Amino acid sequence: MTQRREQRAADWLAAAGLRPTRARLVLATLLVGDGRDRHVTAESLFEAAAGGDEAVSLATVYNTLRLFCSAGLLREIMVDGARVYFDTNMTDHPHFFWEDSATLSDAPKEELEIRRLPMAPMGAEIAAVDVVIRLRSKSG
């Protein structure tokens, strides 16, 4: 099972042309080893790595996540000015941000309808549209 997870991670890195260093393999295995999409912060990935056999510094986690984004393996989702999540699902889709638990999850894209976007200012073009729907538990 572990060998299969590591192979999936190695294949993920190879598809982007990235060399499978020890740290990259550790983090890639945590991100995609089980074949499921996930949303992580650098801190949550660091904690997950700390629970394993291979220690990875927080600085390495940040640098590796940025590299994975640059290579097109992860999407960066900015929830607010201080909170960044990394998504392994590279398709266009909206997200739910659960304020009570500070977690991010996929929202059903088939239920989202955007009919029109504003015109981009002169000299600019729209690069992407990220939809984050904030949720909180109902009181009472």
Image: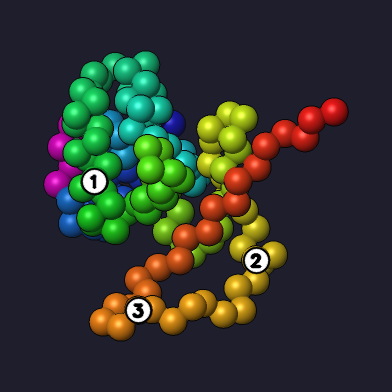
Mark 1: few, some, or many residues within 10 Å (few <14, many ≥20)?
Answer: some
Q: Secondary structure at mark 2?
A: loop
Q: Give the residue drawn at x 54%, y 35%.
A: 103
Q: Which residues are magenta?
A: 19-23
Which mark's residue is nearer the viewer, 1 or 3?
A: 3
Q: Would you say residue 10 is visible in this rendering?
A: yes
The answer to whether residue 7 of the structure is visible from this angle is: no
Residue at the spot of label 1: 66
How far across and how far down the image is residue 5, in percent? 38, 37
Residue nearest the viewer, comparing 77 with 22: 77
**Picture mark count:** 3
Horizontally, is 106 left or right of 73 in the view?
Answer: right
On the image, numbered disc 2 is attached to which residue? 112
The amino acid sitting under disc 3 is: Pro
Residue 14 is situated, as x and y percent measured from the top left of the image, at: 23, 53
Is 45 located above or below residue 10 in the figure?
above
| Residue 121, numbered circle | 3
Q: Could you tell me residue 20's position as x and y percent?
A: 18, 42
Task: Tell whether 57 sits left or right of 33.
Answer: left
The Cα atoms of the two marked residues, 2 and 3, are separated by 25 Å
Identify the residue at image location x=40%, y=28%.
Answer: 44
Instruction: Say which of marks 2 and 3 sits in front.
Output: 3
Callout 1: helix, strand or loop? Answer: helix
Q: CA distance from mark 1 to mark 3?
A: 28 Å
Q: Given contact means CB atoms under 8 Å apart, are the residues at marks 1 and 3 in contact? A: no
Residue drawn where x is 18% and y is 57% of the image: 17
Q: Amino acid at mark 2?
A: Leu
Q: Magenta span has 114?
A: no
